[in-house]
Image (tube, rainbow, N blue to C red):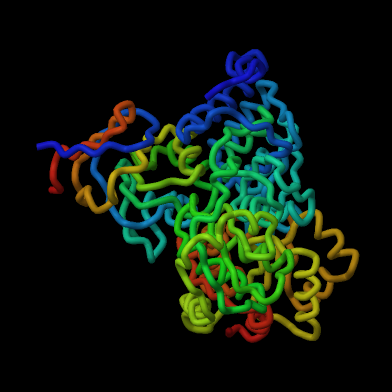
Amino acid sequence: MTTLFRARQALGRPVRGEALVAHDGFSARYDLDRIRGTFSRPAHKLAGQSYNGRILVLDTAKGGVATSWMLHEMASRGIVPLALVLNSVNPILVQGAAFGNVTMLVGFDGDITAQVPHGATVEIDPAARTLAITAAPR
Amino acid sequence: MKLNDLERAMLAGELGPAVKEAIEHQVKVGDFFGAEDFVPVTQAHIMADTESLGEAGVAWVERLARSGGRVRVPTITDPRGTDFARFGVLKHPQWIVELERRAVKAFTGLGVLMTDTCINYQTIQAPARGESVAFGDTGVVIYANSVCGARSNYEGGPAAVAAGLTGRAPRYGFHLASHRRATLRIVVSFQPRTLNDWGALGGVVGRLAGNYWAVPYVEGFTEVPGSDALKHFGAAMASFGSIALYHLAGITPEAEDCGGTALPVAHRIGEADVKALQSAYADGNDVDVVVFSAPQLSLYELQKLAGLCNGRRFVKPLLAMTSPQVKPDADRFGLTQRIEDAGGHVLSGMCFYQSYAREIAEANGWKRLATNSAKLVNILGGYGYVPLLASMERCVAAAESGHL
């Protein structure tokens, strides 16, 4: 059975992939080893995990403006998240998603990081502003 | 978004492909945030280091410049990824220097002024109260909004380029009076004395506030801080919490009318809270490198640093980074010489974390980095460093002894 969540804001194209979930923030500069495609900040709840091709389900944006360039740069090398799903964002993440063509969903009823299981397969439809859990974690 | 005749012409490509691409990006972002229209801006400020842009970003700016794009309002830049005169100090490889040169040529082609500074409110032109701008560095935005009373959202690199090309920004967020009202009230019972105390306090406030749309109203200070203190306070708050605007009771220009006193007290911050944040960046005492940066140093910070360097001989690298506007004065007043006589380096137009921090750590064998910048310690963990936070005095002593 599919579980559906509706967001208040959306951007980008439909995507389907594995969700990487944590109640933590996101900044490409602060948190990532962009060459290896992993979370590199030791204190991050996803430290050591690969973000490449995954749908990141996180809480909010951290400081820093570099993400607006870096998502585009990451996409140019093909080592980039498939989508960003967040409880809230700052303009930097939105500008970066728009510039880097990274799908984004923002703002749900309740904490989305508590509702999507880590490792679940999810589908995102920005036009409908929906996230659907289509398969449980393996 | 409602567009006027000029904006419709931009969107139709009548002002060239670069302006068309710029306003398309702005409309996409404006629609996302529900902006009703555009607000004209008087100046734009672009994060333009090539570690952020990458080759792909540089190629994009080159393409805009080749297509005839020219900025419509004064547009300036954040720090570069290297100091062209001193790149050997950091062991920046030639590919970094060449990519930086390409970026400079491309931005210059757009008519951008390469100011290479994150303290433009101290060195170029501070915006006036109510002035709408498009600034692209979190520390710059929070200072402009909070201390100057200007109006800006975080405009990341592509968005700031777009604002320069169109002379406007989508009207949402901190361009709106309704978003500038306080959302949480914080009482402070600790009066910071040093810049790292101010930064650490900013970090504590940022963590408590927690997201971009929060506007802290902070009360309890017994002394009015200066520009450098507020620079570190705001930069750390923006870094730890993605905060773009705060109000200080009795100090900042919009504090009186922001509704802060009508809110219940949400948090009380004392000295123990500030010390707790600082102690999280005190893992052992061996030091590989000492860095003063993030934000770039003012002339007064360099003067103090030069005084602390007198009579010392450093055994560890000490790097002080400032703006191209401050550096000539530091040279002229002999401050650079005094720092370099002790074995330190004064670098211009760059900022440590925007200068390929991972690559220079590997090239120089740096891991344990001491600084008085709370913003810098918050950033560098992800780059593989063990950052250590201490006062300027203790950091300088560490460069001499090798230990904090």
Q: Is residue B331 visible?
A: yes
Q: Residue furthest front?
A: B262
Q: Residue furthest left?
A: A1
**Residue B69 at x, y = what percent?**
68, 25
Q: Is residue B83 visible?
A: no
Q: From what the image shows, is residue B89 above or below residue A122?
A: below
**Residue B341 at x, y = what percent?**
80, 76
**Residue A129 at x, y = what percent?**
31, 32
Q: Residue at x 69, y 30 (%)?
A: B167
On the image, which quarter does residue B375 sit in? bottom right
Q: Residue at x 53, y 36 (%)?
A: B56
Q: Which residue is more in the foreground, B289 or B231? A: B231
**Residue B244 at x, y = what percent?**
57, 52
Number of marks drawn: 0
Q: Residue at x 56, y 51 (%)?
A: B181
Q: From what the image shows, is residue A132 above or below residue B339?
A: above
Q: From what the image shows, is residue B379 above or below residue B178?
A: below
Is residue B172 rendered to the left or right of residue A130? right
Is residue A99 rendered to the left or right of residue B67? left
Q: Residue furthest right?
A: B332
Q: Which quadrant holds the C terminus of chain B?
A: bottom right
Q: Residue at x 24, y 53 (%)?
A: A114
On the image, which quarter does residue B359 sit in? bottom right
Q: From what the image shows, is residue B390 above or below residue B125?
A: below
Q: Which residue is more in the foreground, A45 or B82? A: A45
